[in-house]
Image: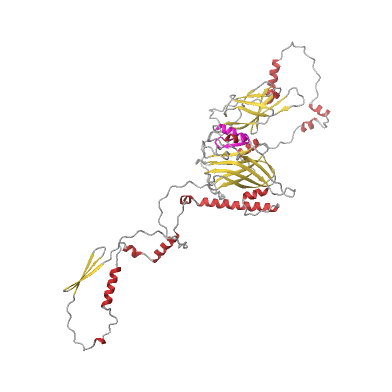
Amino acid sequence: MWKFIVKSQKIETLEHDVIASDQISFVTLNFIFEEDWRKFHKVVQFSQCNETYNLVLGTDGTSCLLPSELRSGMVKMSVFGYDPANMSGLRATTVPVILHIRPSGFVQDSISPVPPTPDLYQQLLAEMEKKIAEMPGGSAGESGKDGADGLSAYEIAVQNGFTGSASDWLASLQGEKGDKGDPGEQGIQGIPGEKGNPGERGLQGEKGEKGDPGEPGKQGEKGDPGEPGQQGIQGIPGKKGEPGENGKDGADGFSPVVTTEQTNDGAIIMITDAIGVHTVTLHNGLDGKDGQDGQAGTLDSVDLTNYATIDYVEELTANISKTSHTHVNFTTLNSLSINDIDTWNLAASKAHWHKNAEILDTLTADMIARWNQTAEQLADTATVIAQNLTTMGVPATADENLNTLAAKILEIPQDGTSSPVGKEILLNTLDFSSSEETLENYANSIYIYESSAENFQTLAEIVDKWGGVASNNNFVSKTNPNFGINMANWSETNIDTGILFAHKLELFTGRLLFSIYASFSNWTNQTLHFHLIQAETPEQAIEKALAGEYVQSADYTMAGAIAQTDDIFAFGSVSAGNYYLYIDGTSKGDNSNFTYAKIEYLNY
């Protein structure tokens, strides 16, 4: 049931319900009029796109049926009235209210025409006939005499100053050709036709422009290990690492023992090591033939310089016994090269670890590229603002942060020689103490869009739709300290959402900055789209937003998960005019949300 009260020039909703499309004479609208409206002959007017429907209430009527021609979407409703006793043309009007008609589930099995709403002239005639029928009838009088023939329209025109023939007068009645009308709305989807024969293959089209990079895909499953890659180029030696801890003591080594036993025909040599006992048997050689007697000589004449002495041999044998050892992995050790050892030494010099290794492992090349792009944009913005400030008489440098530069804009002298500075706050919930306070202050000055509903609703309407201010999915944050507008719906995910501010931006030609104080949750590398809509009323702005008619747009990218931020966003140059700000984005299915706490703009 719908009930409204009409006060002065505004309509307030007392009771409301869901309205579905395709109804016929089913939805009744009831009105209560305050004292100053009761004397008027009243008419309720409905507007949707380029169509207008009027329903006469008369002087005493208080209800009417919703016109059956209205389709799903947004409908403006207002009331106007006039005093029949006042001959000066007195007319009372109201500011329109917005009704939202949702698509119904009705599917018609045949084309049945919707009964049209009578136009205002037909309704007034019916009202007059009703009044005449209610008048008490008197006795019929005598028929009067025929009156004299009246003047023709042409003769009356001549009496009032027209010069020319009757043909000239008829030609003058033809007005100039009117402007071409706006295109009509798209008709209802027709019944699919039969499948046509395949057409001939068309010519190869020109190569299109490179598309914008898509959003990063989800993390894929871990792949199978790849084949070992080739050894990389020798890197630059790193800094010397800290000495490592002492290793555990190794097992005791085993020194081989060598023993010799002389036999009658030679000797037996036994070597005992970690593997076991190794035995070598030596045999004396056969006696050689006696040689010829040599000449008698002396010992002094023999040169023994190149021969080892008995003492040297015994000392060398003792040293070999002390240092000899064996390795179980002697094959592997024998394969090592000097290059292998150099590579190990280099790796040891570069060895290090990270406390945040898990976080570093999640970084991707795309994320780093976006951060670099954002940093470059911020640097460019700071350079332009600093140059403009300096030109306008306020010293500034590009190495100052954006918040400092934005504050300096207000220092531009207002002496008529410089451009003016405009600054207004569109939203501020930082000093609020509850969600109820946010709703009270912005109930009808903020409009929320949901792609699933395909329309805009006031903040009050959408909070009521999703269970009231205590609900988790009501678009008003319950988190202290900001209690802002939460652009996420926990009941419906992966839908487009948007916020339109009913405050008009009266801009002059110059540059436009937005200061955004907000909290982010899981909106890593998400993008918001800022749109300026040129309009005179919020209702006009809503219609243009639904049609995608934006004068100017710019993207604001958030890099990384940010708990809370106060950021400056340079929108760009704008032309003088009246605008409304509309921001849209996507409510993700992974608990992503974006909460606006304060938004203001600077126009300079």
In which image quadrant can residue 575 be found?
A: top right
Residue 14 or residue 205, whichever sits in front? 14
The answer to whether residue 186 shows anywhere in this view is: no
State the count of labels.
0
Residue under the point 27% across and 75% down: 313
The stretch of residues the image draws in magenta is: 439-465
Compared to residue 211, the image places residue 179 above or below, namely above
Residue under the point 79% across and 32% down: 168
Instruction: Please state the horizontal and vertical placement of residue 447, each as a whole percent of the image.
Output: 61, 36
Instruction: Please state the horizontal and vertical placement of residue 466, each as a whole percent of the image.
Output: 54, 33
Residue under the point 65% across and 54% down: 397
Q: Which residue lies furthest to the left in this view?
A: 264
Q: Reply yes or no: does residue 463 show up in magenta.
A: yes
Horizontal placement of 593 versus 49: left or right? left
The answer to whether residue 57 shows anywhere in this view is: yes
Horizontal placement of 569 versus 86: left or right? left
Compared to residue 46, the image places residue 363 above or below, namely below
Residue 156 or residue 574, whichever sits in front? 574
In which image quadrant can residue 77 be found?
A: top right
How was this image coloured? Answer: secondary structure
Horizontal placement of 216 versus 176: left or right? left
Compared to residue 50, the image places residue 320 above or below, namely below
Dividing the image into 4 quarters, which one contains the N terminus? top right
Residue 314 or residue 231, whichever sits in front? 314
Instruction: Please state the horizontal and vertical placement of residue 32, each as a whole percent of the image.
Output: 65, 24
Instruction: Please state the horizontal and vertical placement of residue 291, each as a whole percent of the image.
Output: 18, 84
Residue 201 or residue 240, whichever sits in front? 240
Compared to residue 505, the image places residue 278 above or below, namely below
In which image quadrant can residue 542 be found?
A: top right
Horizontal placement of 81 versus 259: left or right? right
